Amino acid sequence: MTYTIALLNPRSASGKTTLAINLAFSFALLEMRTLYVDCTSSGAGSRILMGGSSESPCGVADVMSGLVSARGAIVSGPTAWLDVIPASGGEKEAEGFLAFNPEKEKVLALSLRKTGEGYDIVIIDTPSGNGFFVKSALTASDLAVVPLHPSWDGNSQLKEAGLCVEEVVTSLNPDLKGMGLIYMGPSDPAPGEDGMQFVGRLPDCDAIRKGMATGTPVALVDVMSPGAQAFLDLVREMMAAGTDP
């Protein structure tokens, strides 16, 4: 059974893509068939997992516009256990194309349903805010994960993300299990973390920073580094959270 995780945060530069690519790579390291879906406008995460290449004939916006199937947009990732549906541009066009579809936020979920059957894990990276692509990702997911930047007000980030998740659970995806929280470095506990599906914390790690500076998952920088080991612990914790009653 496929387990789908969407990352969201209302603010830009919150660490979503850092988290998403490293979670996807860590699941793959544990030999779980993993699909990374890049709903961002920048496409930074998919470029990293495609070895820096920006050349892809199709991507998420094309899938949502009906120009190609989700399976037809898949590109091989850096290991045999990891594939990518890249960002392709055209997000505004795709949203406009679906504007009069009363169930437009469910299109991504329907597109990924059959494709996802071949994977253990699907990781969906989203743009900042709480717009169409964020709600589409949450509608397709079993769990929402919020990265918290240590230097920002965690309460406001969690509140905005929580309102978006609540809206999706109420009107689009009642099977969404709720939210998990991951601190992207040392920080004080955020209000409300006790209500999270799980709470994780990443260390201040040079290998993580080097990985993002060079476009490399931290496990390829140094698999024994505190950062790489923390990501492996996180994916195990996520799977436990997903299987607990």
Image (tube, helix red, strand yellow):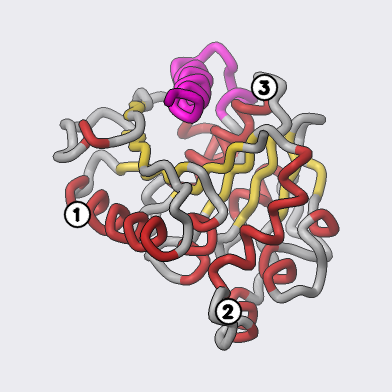
* Relative vertical location of residue 8 with respect to residue 195 in this rendering, above or below: below
The three-letter code of the residue at mark 2 reads Glu
In this view, the residue in front, 60 or 114, is: 114
Residue occupying the point 34% across, 26% down: 201
How far across and how far down the image is residue 218, in percent?
A: 56, 28
Q: Mostly what secondary structure, the magenta segment?
A: helix
N-terminal label among 2 and 3: 3
Q: Assign a secondary structure to mark 3.
A: helix
- Measure how far apart labels 1 and 3 are at the Cα level: 34 Å
Q: Which residue is mark 3?
A: 29
In the displayed structure, 207 sits above or below 131; it is above
Give the residues drawn in magenta, as a range: 218-245
Taking the image as drawn, is residue 206 in sight?
Answer: no
Q: Disc count in the image?
A: 3
Q: Residue at x 60, y 74 (%)?
A: 91
| Circle 2 residues within 10 Å: few <14, some 14–19, many ≥20 | some
Spot occupied by residue 120 in the image (x, y as percentages of width and height): 68, 32
Q: Residue 27, how many percent across, how many down?
A: 62, 27
Q: Name the residue at 36% across, 42% down.
A: 179
* Among the 4 quarters of the image, the one containing residue 3: top right
Residue closest to the eye, 96 or 116: 116
**Is residue 67 among the parts visible in the rendering?**
yes
Three-letter code for the amino acid on which mark 3 is drawn: Leu
Q: Could you tell me which quadrant the C terminus lies in? A: top left
Inspect the magenta stretch and tell me whether residue 110 lies in it: no
Residue 156 marker = 1
Q: Amino acid at mark 1?
A: Ser
Mark 1 burial class by Cα count in 10 Å: few <14, some 14-19, many 20+: some
**Magenta segment: does it hold 222?**
yes
Give the residue number, with chain letter if any, for mark 2.
95
